[in-house]
Image (cartoon, grey):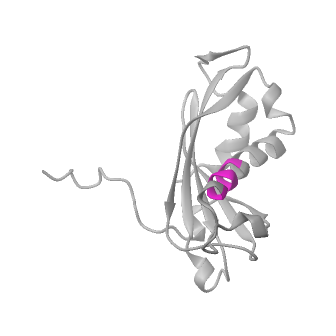
C-alpha cells in the first residue's frame, strides 16, 4: 500500500535557495577518513555547530545559561556527494518547524563552486531541539524561550 500523495517528506537534493542563514567552516586534514572523504562524525559536528553558533550569535547570550535549554532529541544526515579536505564547507541553516517547545532545523552542507558542483547540497542534516528546564533537564518547558524564538523565526521556511 502506498502513502497518500503529499504525505512523504521531500527527499530531493536541496539547493542553496532552501536555506536562510549562512556560515563557512574550514576543513582540516584530520577531518578526512582513510579514504579521503569527510568523516561521518564531522558532518554531525558541522550540523550542531551551524545551529548552536547561530543561536549564540543571534541571541547575544550564552545559550547554555538560559532558564530553558535546547537538548537534541533527534539528528540525522542525508548524504548526496563526497566532501573533504582542503575545501571550505558552506553551511546553510533554515527552520522547518517552530513549535511550542521544540524547533526543527535543516542544515545544508555545500562544498565547491556555488555556480557549478556546489549549487546543490552535498549533505543535509535534520536537527531537533526540545526545550527543557535548565535546572531540571528531564522536564520539558511549555514554550521555546522568547530569545530563541526571536532568533529562529526569521529562518522559517515558507
Q: Considering depth in this image, is 56 or 58 the residue closer to the camera?
A: 56
Q: Considering depth in this image, is 36 or 114 the residue closer to the camera?
A: 36
Q: Is residue 39 above or below residue 56?
A: below
- The chief SS type of the magenta part is helix
Q: Is residue 68 above or below residue 45?
A: above
Q: Residue at x 57, y 70 (%)?
A: 122
Q: Considering depth in this image, is 29 or 18 the residue closer to the camera?
A: 29
Is 152 magenta? The answer is: no
Horizontally, residue 145 falls left or right of residue 5, namely right
Residue 12, how many percent across, how many down? 42, 66
- Number of numbered callouts drawn: 0
Q: Residue at x 59, y 83 (%)?
A: 117
* Image: magenta residue range: 42-48
Residue 63, how many percent across, how many down? 79, 33
Q: Residue at x 76, y 42 (%)?
A: 55
Quadrant hosting residue 87: bottom right
Residue 15, how many percent across, how many down? 55, 71
Q: Residue at x 57, y 74 (%)?
A: 82
Horizontally, residue 48 falls left or right of residue 5, namely right
Outermost residue toward the bottom in this view? 116
Residue 27 in sight from this viewpoint: no
Residue 60 in sight from this viewpoint: yes
Amino acid at each position: 500500500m502506498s502513502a497518500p500523495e503529499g504525505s512523504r517528506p521531500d527527499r530531493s537534493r536541496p539547493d542553496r535557495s532552501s536555506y536562510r542563514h549562512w556560515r563557512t567552516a574550514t576543513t582540516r586534514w584530520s577531518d578526512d577518513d582513510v579514504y579521503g572523504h569527510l568523516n561521518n562524525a564531522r558532518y554531525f559536528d558541522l550540523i550542531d555547530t551551524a545551529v548552536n553558533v547561530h543561536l549564540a550569535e543571534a541571541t547575544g547570550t550564552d545559550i547554555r545559561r538560559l532558564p530553558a535549554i535546547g537538548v537534541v532529541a533527534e539528528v540525522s544526515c542525508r548524504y548526496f556527494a563526497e566532501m573533504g579536505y582542503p575545501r571550505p564547507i558552506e553551511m546553510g541553516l533554515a527552520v522547518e518547524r517552530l513549535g511550542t517547545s521544540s524547533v526543527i532545523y535543516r542544515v545544508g552542507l555545500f562544498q565547491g563552486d556555488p555556480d557549478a558542483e556546489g549549487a546543490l547540497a552535498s549533505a543535509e542534516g535534520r536537527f531537533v531541539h526540545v526545550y527543557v528546564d535548565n535546572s531540571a533537564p528531564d522536564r520539558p518547558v511549555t514554550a521555546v524561550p522568547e530569545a530563541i524564538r526571536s532568533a529562529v523565526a526569521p529562518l522559517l521556511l515558507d
